[in-house]
């Protein structure tokens, strides 16, 4: 296994910090207090995101008999919090954008605990042989530094000047998308040989994780009698993880662990795009204001 290059170790955290700062520009304190005000939708979404998705990743890695580094990387991807792109696509699908933003914000903060935890469990479970066992405290500190701090910075900037923040939001979203694409391209290019050699196994596993996570979350939300707009938000949150975070954390251990996240990032746009197209038509009547 190879150590990631210095450029990658610097570029990925910086890229993620930019994305999280842009997310913070769109957040208010209400996006966190909504957890208390509307607990059912948030609880179902976060349970799916923080428990169901990682456990699915464990099962799928076992099912396909993935090599240890791919299996751990898949769990790392499954444990990643929701991404900013989920908020954008939820809006396009006419889903409950407020719920989507709340889940993304909350799961991004909780990632300080959940991502290192699942990484440690997966490394132990799949008996991944590393040159050095990863120390969790530095990983926790790294996740905090590249998620919570820039997220807080963005929120602070918004609190200081909400009008200016609203003006910057369209540009910030474009920057987030461009940075995200660049991260995926760099990650695939850096490990192209490994990706090419294991593309069949990892592609099927990541696609299975993506489709199953979205399907299960959709069904659970409907059984819980959440409306279609809430169900749409939860499903997209499960489909569009923060793969940039998964890749950035992977580089702290071994760059090959980022392969599943990079491949997942390609498929998630296809499945999410199809889902958005289908749900935007179904949600349209619900999203329209009631006649006066």
Image (tube, rainbow, N blue to C red):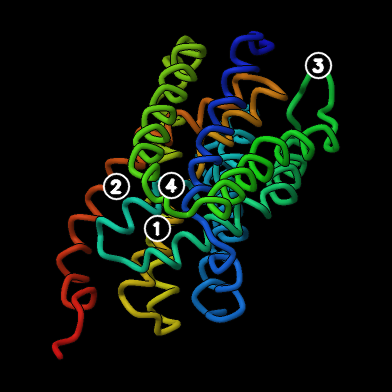
Instruction: Classify residue 9 by image quadrant.
Output: top right
Q: In whole angstroms, how far apart are the C-alphas of marks 4 and 2? A: 34 Å
Label drawn at residue 271: 2
Q: Residue at horizontal 59%, vertical 15%?
A: 8
> Which SS class for mark 4?
helix
> Which SS class for mark 3?
loop
Left or right placement of residue 288 versus residue 102 in this view:
left
On the image, numbered disc 1 is attached to which residue?
214
Q: Position of residue 90 (x, y in %)?
A: 33, 58
Q: Earlier in the sequence, mark 3 or mark 4?
A: 3
| Residue lying furthest bottom | 292
On the image, numbered disc 4 is attached to which residue?
164
> Which SS class for mark 1?
helix
Q: Nearer the viewer, residue 157 or 193?
A: 157
Q: Residue at horizontal 31%, vertical 52%?
A: 89
Q: Is residue 88 above or below residue 73?
A: below
Please identify, in this view, whether the residue under mark 4 or under mark 2 is nearer the observer.
4
Label 1 close to label 2 by CB (< 8 Å):
yes
Label 2 close to label 3 by CB (< 8 Å):
no
Label drawn at residue 161: none
Label 3 close to label 4 by CB (< 8 Å):
no
Q: Nearer the viewer, residue 108 or 215?
A: 108
Q: Earlier in the sequence, mark 3 or mark 1?
A: 3
Q: Position of residue 222 (x, y in %)?
A: 38, 78
Please identify, in this view, whether the residue under mark 3 or under mark 4 is nearer the observer.
4
Q: Residue at horizontal 62%, vertical 60%?
A: 51
On the image, numbered disc 3 is attached to which residue?
131
Q: Position of residue 197 (x, y in %)?
A: 45, 15
Q: Residue at horizontal 17%, vertical 70%?
A: 284
Q: In whole angstroms, how far apart are the C-alphas of marks 3 and 4? A: 48 Å
């Amino acid at each position: 296994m190879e150590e990631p290059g210095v450029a990658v170790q610097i570029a990925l955290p910086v890229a993620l910090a930019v994305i999280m700062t842009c997310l913070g520009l769109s957040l208010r304190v209400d996006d966190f207090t909504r957890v208390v005000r509307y607990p059912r939708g948030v609880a179902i979404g976060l349970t799916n995101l923080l428990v169901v998705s990682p456990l699915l990743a464990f099962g799928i890695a076992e099912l396909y008999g993935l090599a240890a580094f791919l299996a751990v990387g898949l769990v790392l991807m499954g444990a990643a919090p929701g991404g900013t792109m989920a908020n954008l696509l939820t809006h396009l699908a006419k889903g409950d954008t407020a719920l989507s933003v709340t889940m993304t914000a909350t799961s991004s903060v909780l990632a300080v605990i959940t991502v290192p935890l699942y990484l440690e469990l997966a490394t132990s479970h799949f008996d991944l042989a590393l040159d050095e066992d990863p120390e969790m405290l530095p990983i926790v500190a790294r996740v905090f530094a590249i998620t919570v701090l820039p997220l807080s910075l963005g929120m602070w900037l918004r609190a200081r000047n909400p009008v200016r923040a609203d003006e910057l939001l369209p540009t910030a979203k474009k920057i987030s998308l461009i940075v995200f694409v660049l991260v995926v391209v760099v990650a695939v290019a850096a490990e192209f040989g490994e990706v090419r050699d294991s593309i069949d196994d990892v592609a099927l596993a990541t696609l299975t994780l993506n489709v199953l996570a979205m399907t299960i979350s959709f069904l659970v939300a409907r059984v819980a009698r959440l409306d279609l707009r809430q169900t749409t938000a939860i499903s997209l949150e499960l489909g569009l993880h923060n793969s940039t975070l998964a890749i950035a954390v992977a580089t702290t251990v071994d760059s090959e662990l980022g392969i599943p996240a990079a491949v997942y990032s390609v498929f998630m746009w296809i499945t999410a795009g199809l889902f958005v197209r289908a749900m935007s038509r179904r949600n349209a009547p619900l999203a329209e204001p009631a006649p006066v």
